Image: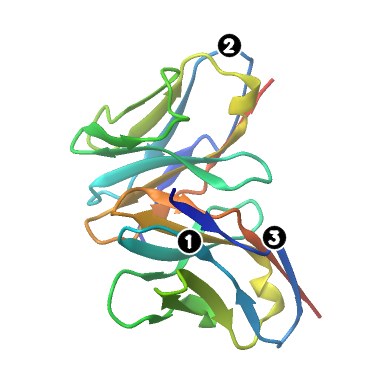
Amino acid sequence: EPEVTQTPSHQVTQMGQEVILRCVPISNHLYFYWYRQILGQKVEFLVSFYNNEISEKSEIFDDQFSVERPDGSNFTLKIRSTKLEDSAMYFCASRQEAWSYTFGSGTRLTVV
Amino acid sequence: AQSVTQLDSQVPVFEEAPVELRCNYSSSVSVYLFWYVQYPNQGLQLLLKYLSGSTLVKGINGFEAEFNKSQTSFHLRKPSVHISDTAEYFCAVSFSRRALTFGSGTRLQVQP
């Protein structure tokens, strides 16, 4: 069964550093998403991406965040200057027109 | 305001007993409804979804859910649970075909 692949599985970074989280969505999917889950809390929407542009974003997705689909396969989330409160599990997801999201296994980001 | 509420943060149940996990939403717009399961240290797996049609939806692992428009609810049920069903369960809603909004989750604890 096709999977959404996320790398790395765990990343530790110092406060103020830039991080890039990487995702390889399912190849024929058209819509791409980033969600995050702070430990013990609910899953929160960050941003959606369609047709090479952001289609929707939440209040969390401020100027510190950016997304990119640099080639035909990767989908990245960049955090420019990490804060302690950015520590969370970040999930990438993708879907076709039909509403069946496939989520990746996540990247656990720890900011120290 | 649009919101998703999972009324129970934890539900303990004995093995082979039935279970219902509750989900209510607040919205005046059209909705798509989903249930996801998250096993420890894993990503989100789709259990079932309601987009249109029959209000009783059957999913994987013997789960089913019923959409009740008048009650704005989408409760998840299983007639007989197993130890392996122990996990966190998230209700999610797409309001007007936008990105998913998740509830806070219900931890199902199946005891022998």
In x, y percent, where is residue A95? 30, 53
Looking at the rendered image, the disc whose residue lies closer to the viewer, 3 or 2, is 3
* Left or right, residue A73 beside residue B47: left
| Badge 3 element | loop
**Hey, which residue is sitting farthest left in the picture?**
A51
Where A75 sits versus B59, above or below?
above
Residue A76: image quadrant is top left
Q: Pick whichever, A54 or B82, lies toward us.
A: A54
Which residue has dot 3 on it?
B9
Which residue is located at x 43 percent, y 77 percent?
Answer: B68
Decide: few, some or many residues near mark 1? Use Cα within 10 Å; few <14, some 14-19, many ≥20: many
Which residue is located at x 58 percent, y 27 percent?
Answer: A86
Where A67 sits versus B81, above or below?
above
Which residue has dot 2 on it?
A16
The kind of residue on which mark 3 rests is Ser
Which residue is located at x 24 percent, y 30 percent?
Answer: A71
Q: How many marks?
A: 3
Residue B105: image quadrant is bottom right
Q: Pick whichever, A9 or A35, lies toward us.
A: A35
